[in-house]
Amino acid sequence: MDVREMMFTALLSMRTHALRSILTMLGILIGVASIIAIVAVGNGGKAAIVSTLESSRLQNTIEILPKELVVPGLPQPGQVLSISANDLNLVRQFHGVTVVNPLYFGQVEVTAGARSANLNLEGGPYFLPDLARFTILHGHMFTPLDVLGHRNVAVLSVGAASQLFGTTHVLGQTVTVGGQPLDIVGISASTEPSILNGILGGGAVYVPNTTLEDIFPNWTASEMAVGVVPGTSVSQLARRLVTALNIHAHSAQAFEDSSGFLAGIEKLVGTVTSILTWVIGSIASIALIVGGVGVMNIMLVSVTERTQEIGIRMSLGASRAAILVQFLMESMFITMTGGFLGILLGAAIAFGVHLATHLPMQVSWQVMVLSFLFSAVIGLICGIYPANKASKQNPIEALRYE
């Protein structure tokens, strides 16, 4: 019996017991599909986060912040991050710098009539939505004139408006921060999760940085947004600014620009998502092992059912090796078919998640190949014992078996 004939016989056996073969390969199919889908979703989520971080970098703008995050109990405003007035003045002296905008972050009590809530207070320039990653739902953002004029205006996040008023239709209403009434000119919705918002929690109130400085003169800036002359090398200027600030602070690790900060976050996100993906994928691979046990069980049943067939083949001259290879092929065909269908199902699940969540999916061809090879290896390993049992049948006893 040549290889092609053994392959044909193996396929014919699968076709003869089609339902049993399908049920047997389900474990392999589900295991492979789970691994493909989990890895695709994990890689896609990581890519989405990295893309978000990359898109947060503004052109012709350098964001500089201290490396150390200091949050002593959180109630004290202005102590989330610290940049001194001397640091701001030092940066303003550099050639290529057009403007230096301090950014303030803290948590304060905000009141509106009889209601009050502890909310995040963020002070910055008029382009704060680009820095803090939010959009305006109602009304408008405060303007450059509001910043220059130290005007008492504020933009509330949806969460802050809901906590203070129970509704988002609050344009023209007033909130009080640090004893200073502020007119609400806009309502914002977050477009990306803010890291500091995630740390501080709650809703947010956005005000011009000049207004915040008037209300809380003792606050120090948490970050600075540095405008750069068009055509200037942003990366080179950023390195010069960070070096100068570190020298001024007498520490080589005091400050960093947002590229270094985001790179650290990207690395952390990549590490965490990779670990989670492979841990969950490893758990899903248990289904492959369970499926392999099912294949072994069915192959043992098949050997028992086909004892007379084995005896006939041996009496017609089939060698023990030929019988062994035939049953190994049947076992591997079942697992490889399950693996192939699992790859298709896993890719379909990943695509379905993409349609539902709009997250980018990254189906790894390396994982596909490894999953398919793993399913083939499981078929080989789990088929060895049944195939060996079939090849060791006594032809005479096999012919008399009923």
Image: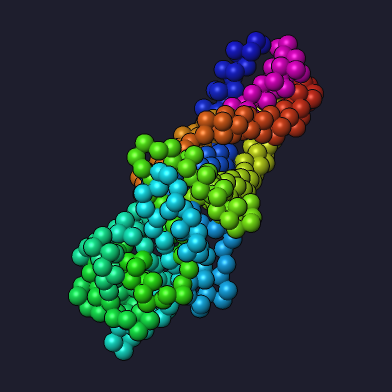
Q: What stretch is highlighted in magenta?
A: 310-335
Whole-percent x, y for residue 394 in the image: 80, 23
Magenta part mainly helix, strand or loop?
A: helix
**Of residues 378 and 157, which is closer to you in this image?**
157
Counting labels gives 0
| Left or right: 64 in relation to 335 | left
At horizontal 39% and vertical 67% (from top left) the residue drawn is 122
Looking at the picture, the colour scheme in use is rainbow
Q: Give the quarter of the figure containing the C terminus.
A: top right
**Of residues 329 and 30, which is closer to you in this image?**
30
Q: Give the quarter of the figure containing the N terminus.
A: top right
At horizontal 58% and vertical 74% (from top left) the residue drawn is 72
Whole-percent x, y for residue 217 in the image: 42, 75
Whole-percent x, y for residue 290 in the image: 64, 44
Whole-percent x, y for residue 307 in the image: 70, 28
**Of residues 126 and 198, which is closer to you in this image?**
126
Residue 361 shown in magenta: no
